[in-house]
Image: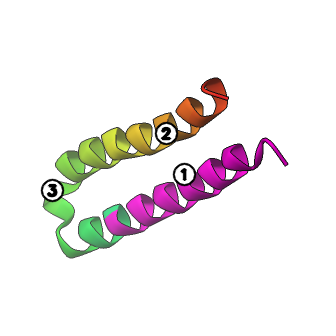
Amino acid sequence: MESIHIGIAAAGGALGVGLIGYGAVMAVGRNPGASSKIMVQAILAIAFAEACVFYAIFLK
């Protein structure tokens, strides 16, 4: 029960990555010409969302 914060952080990170991916796909669908700029921002946002999970794991 002491590691439940890791599970919550992992679930939040997975949800965040999914929402970021969904938003990026919808944005590229609306404006295909801006796909490279959108993908760069999406990759950065995914990296930050995943970093929160690693903080939860290492700060246990």
Name the amino acid type tagged 3: Ala
Q: Residue at x 17, y 68 (%)?
A: 31
- The mark lying in front, picked from 3 and 2, is 2
Calculate the distance from the C-alpha at mark 3 to the C-alpha at mark 2.
28 Å
Magenta extent: 1-23
Calculate the distance from the C-alpha at mark 1 to the C-alpha at mark 2.
7 Å
| Drawn side of residue 39 relative to residue 51, left or right | left
Q: Residue at x 56, y 57 (%)?
A: 12
- Examine the residues drawn in magenta and state their main secondary structure: helix
The residue pinned by badge 2 equals 52
State the image coordinates of residue 34 (x, y, percent, origin top left): 15, 56
Q: Residue at x 58, y 55 (%)?
A: 14
Name the amino acid type tagged 1: Gly
The circle drawn on residue 13 is: 1
Q: Quadrant of residue 60?
A: top right
Q: Nearer the viewer, residue 17 or 25?
A: 17
